[in-house]
Image (spheres, helix red, strand yellow):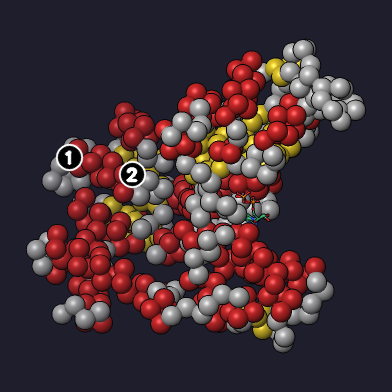
Amino acid sequence: MTSESTRSLLIVEDDPALQKQIKWSVDRFESVTANDRESALVQLRRHAPAVVTMDLGLPPDADGVSEGFRLLEQIISVQPDTKVIVLTGQNDQANALRAVALGAYDFFAKPFEPELLNLTIERAFRMFELQKENRRLQEMHQPDALSGLITRDPEMLRICRTIEKVANSTATVMLLGESGTGKEVLARGLHQASPRKSGKFVAINCAAIPENLLESELFGYEKGAFTGAAKMTLGKIETANGGTLMLDEIGDLPFTLQAKLLRFLQERTIERVGGRQEIPVDVRIVCATHQDLKALSKEGRFREDLYYRLAEIVVNIPPLRARKGDAALLAYSFLRRFVQEQNRGTLNLNEGAVRAIESYGWPGNIRELENCMRRAVIMADGNQISAEDIGIDQPTEDQMDDSLDLRAIRDNAEKNAIIAALGRVNGNIAKAAELLGVSRPTLYDLMHRLGLK
Ligand SMILES: Nc1ncnc2c1ncn2[C@@H]1O[C@H](COP(=O)(O)OP(=O)(O)OP(=O)(O)O)[C@@H](O)[C@H]1O
């Protein structure tokens, strides 16, 4: 319907002679007609026209404008992108302006100059197409900072946009997600998209460093602060001055250090271990964890006041199994990368491998998939990678049923819509066809094909 709508025009005019004249004078567009509000709405649903020309005086209020304005409002609420050109009387500027204020694209006074009307309609089509193209580009656009992040999942794309938006602020960002979901990739993207990108991105994993070393790792130390402190050493916080510091696995930060970190976040100064001087540091903090920090703070293992300082913006990252279509997309991308890195000739995933990748739960998320693909590229014998090479099981018959058979998906969607429409109009076929925007015979055919009779 979308491609058809790109060039289709709806003419709403109750005067048959004038309707014919308009249709004739704009014959280079594919047009459909309607003579009142009801039939216009039916045509709107059926053809989703890009452009509508409409008279404001429609029956039963052919001499007034109430029906015309009602229709205008309905078109704009049902299909906000449609460009509506209102045809008004010669001295009817007030209504023309009111129509534009309500969202009409343009107005035109009758009697009209066919050439001018054609030009206005052509311009409206062009505007419609430009907006459509623009939206498509915006949807495709991945900010450069996140260019390494591969996804087509709507939720992940929304997260990328959030990251892009908050990048300009100084807000502390908390990334929550299972291990391997790309928290570090997003934190780096945030840094790259921010005005701090000329500074350093420094990451520290709070779970990987023994408690007794973590303080000096974070805050640095002065010469002689402890045995072996041979020279003054900067901590990660100071190293990230002017940039971004990622505190990974923040849930594992020992309680004593939580107080010290909180002080830093409040005062934005640090004291190195063994030092007395307060050193101002300008750093943006991003923290990440796979743990439930709220639950930890209820158990008394994580300071609630620190949690609220760190959670100015919370981003919940979905696991790979919840991202629609991403597993196969990522698998192909890793395949290309590893084939190149390992200098292997052509290698492809066989059907069983793709199905296995799509149906497996990926508890280790993208990291696990990345590792499996690396292994598969090494293990594959011929030019095909099988599920076995990847090291995951083939899906069962049940899982196979949940396939991406487009026809089955479409049939199902059509069936549901028809059942809902028939329910709404108490089984009246003519009304259901109208609601669905198809003709009665088409609806009969569909019901027959889908076994709904
Ligand atoms: N959307 C993605 N597109 C491409 N590669 C990704 C994507 N997400 C993650 N990766 C890759 O997956 C691996 C794991 O990502 P990352 O280290 O960011 O996850 P994490 O959530 O920080 O993991 P952990 O919690 O274990 O530290 C990295 O090699 C990263 O490059």
Q: Amino acid at mark 2?
A: Ile
Crowdedness of circle 2 by 10 Å Cα count: few (<14), some, many (20+)? Answer: some
Q: Amino acid at mark 1?
A: Asp
Considering the numbered disc 1 on the image, is that residue within a helix, a strand or a loop?
Answer: loop
Residue 241 vertical position relative to residue 288 in the rendered view, above or below: above
Q: Which residue is mark 2?
A: 76
Q: Which of pointers 1 and 2 indicates the residue nearer the eye?
A: 2
Residue 332 vertical position relative to residue 208 in the rendered view, above or below: below
Q: Residue 332 in the image: state x and y as whole percent.
A: 64, 69
Left or right placement of residue 410 versus residue 212 in this view? left
Foreground of the two, 256 or 103 = 256
Crowdedness of circle 1 by 10 Å Cα count: few (<14), some, many (20+)? Answer: few
Residue appearing at x 86%, y 30% in the figure:
228
Residue 39 visible (yes or no): yes
Which label number is shown at residue 63?
1
Residue 275 vertical position relative to residue 15 in the rendered view, above or below: above
Cα–Cα span, label 1 and label 2: 23 Å
Asked if disc 2 is less than 8 Å from ligand 1, the answer is no
Residue farthest along the top direction in this orientation: 277
Image quarter where the C terminus lies is bottom left
Q: Residue 13 in the image: state x and y as whole percent.
A: 26, 51
Residue 251 vertical position relative to residue 334 in the rendered view, above or below: above
Which label number is shown at residue 218?
none
Foreground of the two, 287 or 410 = 287
Residue appearing at x 31%, y 39% in the figure:
88
Q: Residue 302 in the image: state x and y as whole percent.
A: 51, 32
Q: How many marks?
A: 2
Left or right placement of residue 148 versus residue 200 in this view? left
Left or right placement of residue 48 versus residue 433 in this view? right
Residue 242 visible (yes or no): no
